[in-house]
């Protein structure tokens, strides 16, 4: 290609990728669909312009590649290669996706059905949990960075895009040591009103709870069809985020359960300490309002954080079995909603939701109502993960298998006895 030429269909990028078509063009980048010349696999390639804005876009490309090395998950779009063209422009090779981003879907269809909205947010929680587990905060979760595609079974799958504004462990220190003339992406405000108040005031204070604010705004938009803190300018929107209470979620829609609305409001607390403190708390609270698989998704979110050494609150792992219901059944969700109406808190009690998840995990065993659990430190069968002083209960898989085998043998013996009895009756 000629120096700085406009990329067109048929052009070969970096000597390896033939361009099929233009996907998007921004103020400083161009995104094209291309196929590898040898492997014939399809990719999306983002190319930064050679302008001042383009040089800033290169920083974003570098962060996206860095994130891809740390965050690998089915709900996070893949990034494979960062390179430089002969004319000096940088390019990033990414996973090619078919579908639309949530912003386009929202603009075309308006508010989503409750279960669908919750399911999409729960999938986003899965991708973010993988990032939070390695200390990465996205800082710009919004509908345009969430792509809705489909898996091999035709089911909707969210792909989290663009970690270009992400915060990484130790990155602020690196930014301070860098060239002062270089504009640090740590200072970027993100997309109002999806940016949390603490991020607007002090970019260094953004943490995983800032992403939870963004998820609250996202859920508000998907349920209501409108943005909270909407204004005629980004500056005015930021002012509303900092100073005004969250608008009512129920305007124009009367099928949003009050408990679900309070979950959204808690995500949008101005004080990070008043929000859900990690994604597992949010996921287990949302799960009862999702589809049949929502409970399993919430469990995977919690498992991702525990596996990374981020321990959810004690209530999420030391609860009695209170139900024995099929996964995500209407009865299970009704019990959840009925019990949460009794609570004085603003959101469902995480212990109650976790108890439902525990019951679901044991749904193949008889329902048993047990006394409150002993303190973890005094209970047998408790392990302490490496690098943690907090014990984590684990399931004795061998004992469970032995019990199942014993039950199967008893059932088989009863069947044999019944057969013998029937034969004797027929002989009489």
Image (cartoon, rainbow, N blue to C red):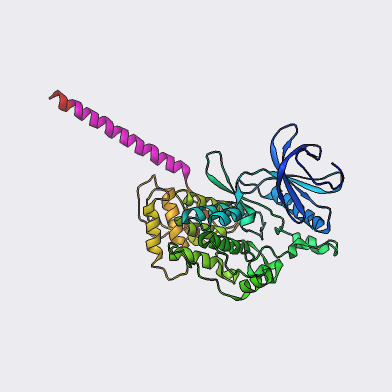
Instruction: Say which of 134 and 68 sits in front.
Output: 68
Q: Position of residue 421 (x, y in %)?
A: 20, 30
Query: Is residue 374 in view?
Result: no
Position of the N terminus by quadrant: top right
Q: Is residue 277 left or right of residue 333?
A: right
Q: Residue furthest bottom?
A: 243
**In the rendered image, the vertical position of residue 284 relative to residue 14, given as above or below:** below
- Judged left or right of residue 314, residue 415 is left
> In this rendering, is residue 243 above or below 115?
below
Give the farthest residue toward the top: 427
Q: Which one is nearer the viewer's eye here, 252 or 177?
A: 252
The range drawn in magenta is 396-423
Q: Report how many numbered discs are placed on residues in the image.
A: 0
Q: Visible in this render: residue 111?
A: yes
Magenta run includes residue 129: no
Q: Is residue 420 magenta?
A: yes
Viewer-nearest residue: 316 or 70: 70
Q: Quadrant of residue 302?
A: bottom right
Q: Please tell me which residue lies in front, 83 or 304.
A: 83
* Residue 75 x %, y %: 60, 48
Residue 152 lies, in percent from the top left, at 55, 38
- Per the picture, the main secondary structure of the magenta-coloured stretch is helix
Q: Position of residue 202 (x, y in %)?
A: 70, 70
């Amino acid at each position: 290609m000629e120096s700085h030429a406009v990329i067109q269909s048929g052009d070969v990028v970096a000597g390896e990728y033939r361009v099929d078509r233009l996907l998007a063009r921004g103020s400083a980048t161009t995104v094209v669909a291309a196929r590898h010349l040898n492997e014939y696999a399809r990719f999306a390639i983002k190319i930064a312009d050679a302008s001042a804005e383009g040089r800033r876009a290169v920083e974003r490309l570098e962060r996206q590649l860095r994130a891809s090395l740390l965050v690998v998950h089915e709900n996070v779009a893949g990034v494979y290669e960062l390179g430089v063209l002969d004319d000096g422009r940088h390019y990033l090779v990414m996973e090619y996706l078919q579908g639309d981003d949530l912003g386009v879907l929202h603009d075309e269809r308006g508010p989503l059905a409750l279960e669908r909205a919750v399911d999409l947010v729960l999938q986003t929680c899965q991708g973010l949990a993988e990032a939070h587990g390695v200390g990465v905060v996205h800082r710009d979760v919004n509908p345009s960075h969430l792509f809705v595609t489909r898996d091999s079974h035709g089911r909707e799958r969210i792909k989290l895009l663009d970690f270009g504004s992400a915060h990484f462990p130790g990155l602020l220190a690196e930014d301070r040591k860098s060239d002062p003339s270089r504009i640090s992406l740590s200072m970027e405000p993100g997309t109002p009103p999806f940016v949390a108040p603490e991020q607007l005031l002090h970019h260094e204070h953004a943490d995983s709870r800032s992403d939870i604010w963004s998820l609250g705004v996202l859920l508000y938009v998907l349920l209501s069809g409108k943005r909270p803190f909407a204004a005629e300018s980004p500056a005015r929107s930021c002012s509303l985020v900092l100073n005004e209470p969250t608008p009512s979620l129920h305007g124009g829609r009367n099928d949003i359960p009050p408990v679900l609305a309070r979950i959204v409001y808690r995500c949008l607390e101005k004080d990070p300490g008043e929000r859900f403190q990690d994604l597992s708390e949010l996921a287990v609270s949302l799960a009862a309002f999702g589809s049949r698989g929502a409970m399993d998704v919430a469990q995977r979110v919690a498992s991702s954080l525990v596996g990374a050494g981020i321990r959810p609150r004690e209530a999420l792992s030391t609860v009695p079995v209170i139900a024995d219901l099929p996964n995500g059944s209407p009865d299970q969700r009704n019990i959840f909603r009925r019990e949460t109406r009794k609570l004085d808190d603003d959101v469902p009690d995480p212990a109650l939701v976790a108890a439902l998840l525990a019951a679901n995990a044991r749904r193949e065993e008889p329902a048993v109502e047990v006394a409150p659990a002993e303190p973890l430190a005094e209970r047998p069968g408790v392990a302490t993960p490496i690098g943690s002083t907090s014990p984590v209960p684990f399931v004795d898989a061998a004992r469970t298998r032995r019990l199942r085998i014993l039950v199967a043998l008893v059932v088989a013996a009863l069947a044999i006895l019944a057969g013998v009895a029937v034969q004797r009756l027929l002989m009489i």
